[in-house]
């Protein structure tokens, strides 16, 4: 049902730790073109610890992450999701998304939503492979004024 990489990527999934903040911030700046107060990660990570996944390389350095929150009853939201440029296309994102969706199923969530830049065709294709569909256009959604799409999928 979900795309599975032929080989597991050379990463381990674990929960977020405060020491991860500089690495996550760097990934966010490069991949998402956003800059957030570093305290945001720790604050959001305490709300649903199992929803903040870190993909760490063999030296335990974060190379990707997925930060999920639940702000609506029985619904999860992928608030931030990115993989370091040097670790893309080897299955890290797929592993993060598959694990997150499984955790949503275990919590009996009905739906998962996320936002993506309209210009990010690679991410849109990735999310479509996981059965996400565009449900809304978010005008001037990002800090630089770019529009975004809200995408959603059922959890089953």
Image (spheres, grey):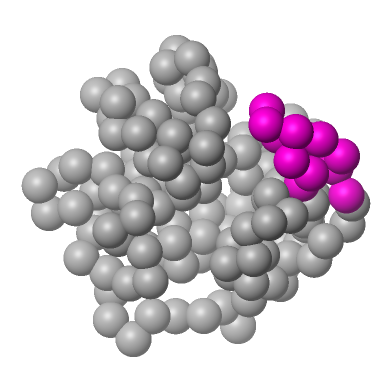
- Please state which of residues 44 and 28 is positioned toward the viewer in this rendering: 28
Residue 111 locus on image (x, y percent): 77, 54
Q: Would you identify the image quadrant in which residue 140 lies?
A: top right
Q: Look at the image and tell me whether residue 51 can be seen.
A: no
Residue 123 locus on image (x, y percent): 59, 62
Residue drawn at (42%, 17%) of the image: 38
Q: Would you identify the image quadrant in which residue 54 lies?
A: top left
Q: Is residue 140 left or right of residue 44?
A: right
- Please state which of residues 121 and 43 is positioned toward the viewer in this rendering: 121
Q: Residue furthest left?
A: 59
Residue drawn at (34%, 86%) of the image: 6
Quadrant including the N terminus:
bottom right
Residue 79 locus on image (x, y percent): 62, 38
Q: Is residue 137 left or right of residue 152?
A: right
Q: Is residue 121 left or right of residue 48?
A: right
Quadrant including the C terminus:
bottom right
Residue drawn at (79%, 51%) of the image: 149
Residue drawn at (88%, 49%) of the image: 137
Q: Would you identify the image quadrant in which residue 18 lies?
A: top left
Q: Look at the image and tell me whether residue 125 can be seen.
A: yes
Q: Is residue 135 left or right of residue 38?
A: right
Q: Is residue 96 above or below residue 31?
A: below
Residue 92 locus on image (x, y percent): 36, 63
- Please state which of residues 122 and 5 is positioned toward the viewer in this rendering: 122
Is residue 140 found inside the magenta-colored segment of the image?
Answer: yes
Predominant SS of the magenta segment: loop
Q: Is residue 8 above or below residue 132?
A: below
State which region is magenta. Answer: 137-148
| Figure disc tally | 0
């Amino acid at each position: 049902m979900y795309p599975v990489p032929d080989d597991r990527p050379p990463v381990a999934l674990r929960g977020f730790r405060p020491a991860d903040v500089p690495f996550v911030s760097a990934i966010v700046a490069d991949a998402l073109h956003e800059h957030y107060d570093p305290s945001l990660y720790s604050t959001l990570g305490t709300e649903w610890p199992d929803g903040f996944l870190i993909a760490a390389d063999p030296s335990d350095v974060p190379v990707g992450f997925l930060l999920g929150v639940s702000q609506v009853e029985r619904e999860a939201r992928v608030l931030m999701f990115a993989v370091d440029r040097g670790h893309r296309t080897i299955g890290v994102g797929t592993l993060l998304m598959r694990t997150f969706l499984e955790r949503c199923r275990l919590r009996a969530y009905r739906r998962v939503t996320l936002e993506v830049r309209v210009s990010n065709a690679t991410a849109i294709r990735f999310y479509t492979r996981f059965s996400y569909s565009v449900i809304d256009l978010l005008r001037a959604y990002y800090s630089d004024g770019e529009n975004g799409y809200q995408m959603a999928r059922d959890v089953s």
